[in-house]
Image (tube, helix red, strand yellow):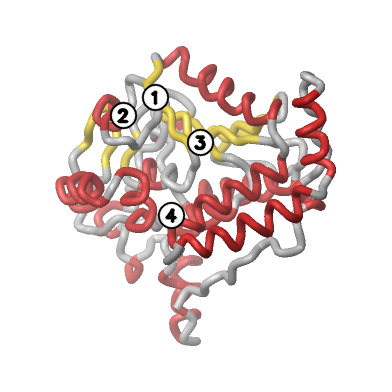
């Protein structure tokens, strides 16, 4: 297992917990945290013993957004304080490679979008900027009553990142998304709940227990292969231009999974009134048509 500098990674009872761990800076997001979370998601997808993932933050915050310790030039790619990053960017520019301009938050959310396991955000405190946009491709968000949330980009002179112009309107609707992003104001957990950003609020001491109960419901009662396919089907059909696209994938899924061991076990256990014992594994047993999409390239 990799050694992580900015996160904690733990697996217990088939639930992985990824804790953003820079509490002295309210878990502000930096390049090392990006690398650590990407590595952790690779671990999650490679481990059939992990059935669900919970993200949370150490200390009193979830994530205070981008680390602004570089000062006024934090978002200025032409004035990077990290000399190695600046040198790499210059080399890529010279070679016509546009990868130098890719947003780190977007690299993270695209990887979360590709993840094969359910992702649950337990937002335990302030979550602003990338601290909240990183949660948008997660499947379910719970929040502490102490959480404070802000899409603050307009107040920093930049734009929403981490693919949030795609995810946020799909989660809360375009009008609410525009209101929050236009104003850049920080709002409380009750407004996040009313706006549909989070599914429930919990007292701080109850938040992780609620998240684990939800993750456990998935881990203990469902087919891992079914859940992987369902996750990708529902997310990707948000961009489909006709329900026929869903019908194509639904039909393939029913045929391929219907002949498999988990479908046989799911029906048998129901009829016999006993807990199911599913055996198929996402690392080995996904159907041959998966993935059914072509990955777009950054250009």
Residues marked 4 and 3 touching at CB (< 8 Å): no
Residue 109: tell me if it is visible: yes
Q: Residue at x 81, y 50 (%)?
A: 259
Q: Which residue is mark 1?
A: 200
Residues marked 1 and 2 touching at CB (< 8 Å): yes
Task: Locate residue 174, reporting x and y percent.
Answer: 25, 51
Q: Residue at x 44, y 56 (%)?
A: 238
Q: Which residue of the protein is positioned furthest toward the left in this rendering? A: 183
Asked whether, in this view, residue 230 is left or right of residue 172, the answer is: right
Residue neighbourhood size for the residue with mark 1, other residues' Cα within 10 Å, grouped as few (<14), some (14–19), many (≥20): some
Asked whether 295 or 68 is in front, the reply is: 295
Front disc: 2 or 3? 2
Distance from disc 1 to disc 2, alpha carbons, whole Å, reads 6 Å
Q: Which residue is mark 2?
A: 193
- State which tag comes first along the sequence, 2 or 3: 3
Residue 67: tell me if it is visible: no
Front disc: 4 or 1? 1
Distance from disc 4 to disc 3, alpha carbons, whole Å, reads 14 Å
Task: Locate residue 71, reporting x and y percent.
Answer: 28, 52
Task: Locate residue 58, reporting x and y percent.
Answer: 48, 27
Asked whether 198 or 207 is in front, the reply is: 198
SS label for mark 3: strand
SS label for mark 1: strand
Q: Which residue is mark 4?
A: 105
Q: Which residue is mark 3?
A: 20
Q: Residue at x 81, y 52 (%)?
A: 284
Distance from disc 2 to disc 4, alpha carbons, whole Å, reads 24 Å
- State which tag comes first along the sequence, 4 or 3: 3
Asked whether, in this view, residue 78 is left or right of residue 141, the answer is: left
Distance from disc 2 to disc 3, alpha carbons, whole Å, reads 23 Å
- State which tag comes first along the sequence, 1 or 2: 2
């Amino acid at each position: 297992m990799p050694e992580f500098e900015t996160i904690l990674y733990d697996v217990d009872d088939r639930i992985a917990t990824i804790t953003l761990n820079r509490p002295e800076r309210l878990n502000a997001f930096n390049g090392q945290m990006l690398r650590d979370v990407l590595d952790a998601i690779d671990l999650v997808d490679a481990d059939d013993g992990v059935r669900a993932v919970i993200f949370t933050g150490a200390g009193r915050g979830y994530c205070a957004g981008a680390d602004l310790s570089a000062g006024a030039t934090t978002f200025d790619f032409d004035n990077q304080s990290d000399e190695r990053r600046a040198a790499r960017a210059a080399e890529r520019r010279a070679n016509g490679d546009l990868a130098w301009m890719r947003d780190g938050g977007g690299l993270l959310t695209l990887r979360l979008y590709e993840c094969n396991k359910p992702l649950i955000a337990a937002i335990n405190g302030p979550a602003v900027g990338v601290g909240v946009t990183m949660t948008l491709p997660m499947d379910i968000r719970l929040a502490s009553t102490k959480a404070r949330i802000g899409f603050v980009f307009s107040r920093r002179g930049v734009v929403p990142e981490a693919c949030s112009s795609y995810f946020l309107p799909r989660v809360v609707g375009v009008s609410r998304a525009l209101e929050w992003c236009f104003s850049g104001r920080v709002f409380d957990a009750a407004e996040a709940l009313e706006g549909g950003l989070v599914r429930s609020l919990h007292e701080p001491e109850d938040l992780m227990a609620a998240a684990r109960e939800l993750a456990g419901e998935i881990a203990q009662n469902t087919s891992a292969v079914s859940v992987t396919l369902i996750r990708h089907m529902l997310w990707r059909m948000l961009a489909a231009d006709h329900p026929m696209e869903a019908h194509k994938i639904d039909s393939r899924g029913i045929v391929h999974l219907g002949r498999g061991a988990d479908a046989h076990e799911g029906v048998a256990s129901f009829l016999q009134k006993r807990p199911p014992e599913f055996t198929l594994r996402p690392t080995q047993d996904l159907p041959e048509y998966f993935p059914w999409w072509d990955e777009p390239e950054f250009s």
